[in-house]
Amino acid sequence: MPQILEKCYEYNIEMHVLFIDFKQAFDSVDKQNTIQILQELRIPNKLVRLIKMTIQNMEASVKIENLTSNPFSISSGVRQGNPLSATIFNLISILSFHRVHYVVCFLLGISPVSEV
């Protein structure tokens, strides 16, 4: 990264850098937004309904030694370790990056390179 920045400075090339903190990213996924994003990406309705079934009505309990808590509802996030969760997160990230791209292009007064 430092070399890229140095070369951009050396050749007077404008550069914009965006840093995103993915810490606890799976825990922060909003379920309702997820469904809307999947529909916006034109994912087939049948698949959206199946995904909705897997991310809604999630419950968990905590076990410490031999004691287990009562189940409680999980209102945000997706299941970690589930391959579908990584795919959902990647789809959301792709759309988010495209949106940032369009905003930056608008602010810079340039034409966006690609569409979703």
Image (cartoon, rainbow, N blue to C red):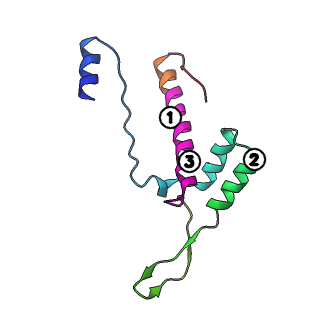
Q: Which mark is residue 97?
A: 1
Tell me the element at label 1: helix
Tell me the element at label 3: helix
Q: Is residue 64 magenta?
A: no
From the image, tell me which residue sits under label 2.
45
Q: Which mark is residue 26?
A: none
Tell me the element at label 2: helix
In magenta, the rendered stretch is: 77-103
Q: At x 54% / y 54%, what residue is drawn?
A: 83
Residues marked 3 and 2 touching at CB (< 8 Å): no
Q: Give the number of callouts.
A: 3
How far is disc 3 from disc 2 in space, using C-alphas? 17 Å
From the image, tell me which residue sits under label 3.
87
How far is disc 1 from disc 3 in space, using C-alphas? 15 Å
Q: Amino acid at mark 3?
A: Thr
Residues marked 1 and 3 touching at CB (< 8 Å): no
Q: Nearer the viewer, residue 52 or 33?
A: 52
* Residue 32 image offset from top left, x and y in percent: 63, 53
Classify 64 as above or below 12. below
Q: Nearer the viewer, residue 49 or 40?
A: 49
